[in-house]
Image (cartoon, rainbow, N blue to C red):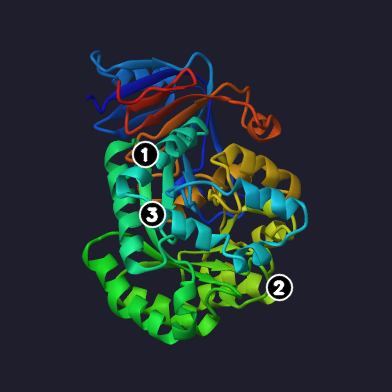
Amino acid sequence: MSQDLFIKNIRRLYTPLTADAEDPARPVHEVANAAVLILNGRIAEIGVERDVCRNAPNDVPVLDAEQRVALPGFVDCHAHPVFVGERSHEFHRRNAGTTYQQIAAEGGGITASAQALAEASTEEMVRQSLPRLDRCLLCGTTTLEAKSGYGLVWEQERKQLEAIGRLRQCHPIDLVPTFLVHSVPASRENEREAFIEEVCGRMLPAVAEKHLAEAVDVFCEDGAFAVEESRKILMCAQELGLEIKLHANQFGHTGGARLAAELHAMSADHLEHLSDEEIAALADTKVVCVLLPACIVFLGNLPYPRARKLIEQGARVAVATDMNPGSSMTESLPLCQTIAAVHCRMNPAELLWAVTYDAARALRHHHRIGSLEMGKEGNITLWDIPHLEYLSYHFGAPLLTHAVVRAQVVVSQGRIGYGN
């Protein structure tokens, strides 16, 4: 298949630029009447169409944008897309007054997902996950983090990571695998120390040796792992050459944000509860603060992160879906942008950075994706909108018309178009 493509007749193109990566104002570069030339899967020329046309070979396939808006492919930097089954009954129980913690204590929550995964084959995990990846594409996502964490015990964690590996081979979305140490299995609750030793002595070395994941995430919360337990696991991961990140401060001031700053993690995710001191520490250490606003809507009982304070302090802020069956069942980054605009008071430029360049930084992939610049991978989305501000304003509508991944048109006229 050709890795060349000439995209012409773009009404407006919006992108962050690497040169502005440390600018707290988060400026967005805009080009009217734009075109993009992709050669060998990477952007070779970008700018005003009349200029780009001069360097476009005659035999390159052409995609007419038909006066649509072009944006970088979105990067969803916190997601749990590979799972089996669903938990809609828990959603409605919570709405009737049962808490997330009560459901978990009854064997629901993560335990229920772990049981479903244990009973499923790798092939079944792949089969059920493929439609979710397609829906991500239809929402503009071209790079997606894929966490494990529903296996709990190593045999099932490995199976989940292997399913992620198979999906990487058969789906055009760029999946970035993360090994999530989610919680202590119920059967091992009285053996916490021994379980953590197993994580550090067996699981993490296997992940590193077999390249099953790029990063290790720990759920540092009450009911999961305490700060000192999390520190032990994460420092072991760092010693093995793996990147680290944390679920932090979702249900309270549990110390995860401070730990992320202390260990210079890639990202600290959730952050519904933050003190001024924690915000300053995250900003100073340049840990990417990943906000998950759809999860807050879905659970219904958590505060929104102090996004404005984070941004004013110079923190790097990303927005992600937290797609998972229990607390955020959505594939839509545009929806998350709307929620962040309303409840976190983020403006359109900040939102674009949050789902492109800064989201790519949260995965340590900003050198190759996250902006439309020469030399970067040709991941581009086209939208039926008049300008950037409109995307988060008109929520819940299928506004994407095309998605391009490394020059391959994988969504065409709003329909999945790969594999044909």
Residue displayed at 75% across by 45% down = 342
* Residue at the image position 42 percent from the left and 68 percent from the top: 244
Q: Which residue is mark 3?
A: 119
Camera sees residue 327: yes
Q: Which residue is mark 2?
A: 276
Q: Point out the frontmost of discs 2 and 1.
A: 1
Helix, strand or loop status at disc 2: helix
Q: Please tell me whether mark 1 or mark 3 is closer to you in this view.
A: 3
| Relative vertical location of residue 385 with respect to residue 343 in this rendering, above or below | above
The kind of residue on which mark 2 rests is Asp
Tag 1's secondary structure? Answer: helix
Q: Is residue 36 visible?
A: no
> Would you say 140 lies left or right of 388 here?
left
What's the CA distance linking mark 1 and mark 3? 14 Å
Q: Give 49 or 179, whichever is nearer the viewer.
A: 179
Estimate the x, y position of residue 251 in percent, counting from the top left.
67, 68
Judged from the image, the secondary structure of the residue bearing numbered disc 3 is: loop
- The residue indicated by pointer 1 is 127
Label 1 amino acid? Answer: Arg
x and y percentages locating residue 253 in the rendered image: 67, 75
In this rendering, the label closer to the viewer, 2 or 3: 3
Q: Earlier in the sequence, mark 2 or mark 3?
A: 3
Q: Tell me the CA gap for discs 2 and 1.
A: 45 Å
Q: Earlier in the sequence, mark 1 or mark 3?
A: 3
Q: Quick one: 37 or 228, which is closer to the camera?
A: 228
Mark 2 and mark 1 in contact? Answer it, CB < 8 Å: no
2 or 1: tag closer to the N-terminus? 1
Whole-percent x, y for residue 12 in the image: 54, 25
Taking 185 as reference, is 35 above or below it? above
Amino acid residing under circle 3: Glu
Q: Residues within 10 Å of mark 1 (few under 14, many from 20)?
A: some
